[in-house]
Image (tube, rainbow, N blue to C red):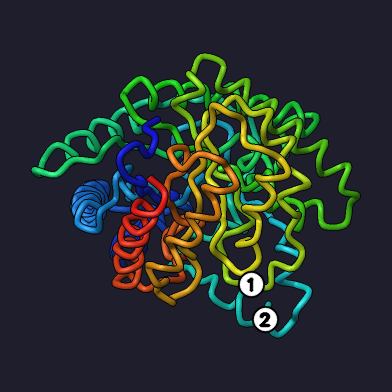
Amino acid sequence: MHKSESRILTTHAGSLPRPKPLVEMFAKLSRREPIDAAALKNAIEESSRRVIERQLAAGIDVGNNGEQPRESFFTYVQHRMSGFGGSSNRQIMRDIVAYPSFAELRLRDLSRTMVNLLAAPKAIGEVRYVDRSPIEAECADSLRLFAEGTDRFVEPFMTAPSPGIIASAMLNEHYPSYGAYVMAIAEALRVEYQYVVSQGFVLQLDCPDLAMERHTSYADRPLGEFLDYVDLNVSALNHALTEVPADRVRMHVCWGNYEGPHDSDVPLDDILPQLYAAKVGGLVLSMANPRHQHEHKSLERNPLPKEWLLVAGVIDTTTNYVEHPEVVAARLEDAAAAVGDPHRVLAGTDCGFDTAAGLGEVAEEVVWKKLETLRAGADLATKSLL
């Protein structure tokens, strides 16, 4: 992965706004309802081209296809793997249900016009990676679209879910234990991880299981049991990465990409030692939202491995406030001071802007303005740090 050598590089956490017609088709696809395949393909092509152009215009250095070919950041695997069907009954985050009036506001938004991650498919048979053609097409199409214009990304990235988030959100009704299930998923994901990196992409692993599950499926259990779960999921992740160079992988750890109280979030201090066991070369962390913007201090107490990069989330993806460039620069300066080397810091976002089709909380025009501000703030930080 490229370091911030001559300037603070900018990136983001993966998903970007999808147009309404594409959202509606993905909502149907996620429920395995019939759709017009040709219309879907054309919509993905048009939308992918648009988000690539908008990223480059905003000054993004390390960019992607905005996850436009996918219904969500993890449920898309049901179309590439065997063993999934039916519907999970996912637990709701503790901080949402703890405030009934907020829960009423929040949960009424889960309509049939969007992809519902609380009702993802579940494992009802053996999980195997059975169809490489979608990931092959996604990589090829992305590289073709990246090459169309005169501007280029410094390097491209592509996201993929961790074994742990699939195992935790796509519930198990087939394997004898959670451990057996998550390791089966890890074995299947090896195919996708290896192929993405072989095509020249940085692989970003989306791992909300390593933080968000503390206030979801582990909300009523001791911290030690959650940390054991984190250790197991990191082991599964490492199995899936066996043949992937660590310096081509960055790991995104998230407490849930939603506007909510977040007062049940596990502190970063509690999980950092476990995260450092992952065979990756970089960490993507939320450092902009009001619950976690102080946690650059955790990196002082638990130093980042010397070969790792940090993508510091300095843009909040759940609010329509547009951050001031000086705020962005100040957050980057704090992150660089905690890491001890500004060259190992990239400017990023807390999470994606459309985690599942239709679930984005920031207006599209505001998304692009936020990314422009990310660049402007990174330029200010470059003057003070490099």
Q: Residues within 10 Å of mark 2 (few under 14, many from 20)?
A: some
Q: Nearer the viewer, residue 62 or 238?
A: 62
Q: Residues within 10 Å of mark 1 (few under 14, many from 20)?
A: some
* Residue in the picture at 83% in, 36% down: 228
377 sits to left or right of 129: left
Mark 2 residue type: Phe
- Residue 242 point in image, percent of width and height: 56, 16
How far apart are the alpha carbons under marks 2 and 1? Answer: 8 Å
Would you place residue 299 above or below residue 372 in this image? above
Mark 1 residue type: Gly
* Residue in the picture at 57% in, 42% down: 339
| Residue 196 shows in this picture | yes
Would you place residue 328 above or below residue 105 in this image? above
Contact between labelled residues 1 and 2, with CB atoms less than 8 Å apart: yes
Question: What SS does tag 1 mark?
Answer: loop
Q: Which residue is mark 1?
A: 260
- Residue 355 point in image, percent of width and height: 47, 56
- Residue 174 point in image, percent of width and height: 72, 33
Question: What SS does tag 2 mark?
Answer: helix
| Residue 126 shows in this picture | no
Q: Which residue is mark 2?
A: 102
Q: Disc 2 vs disc 1: which is toward the camera? A: 1
* Residue in the picture at 48% in, 30% down: 249
Q: Nearer the viewer, residue 249 or 372?
A: 372
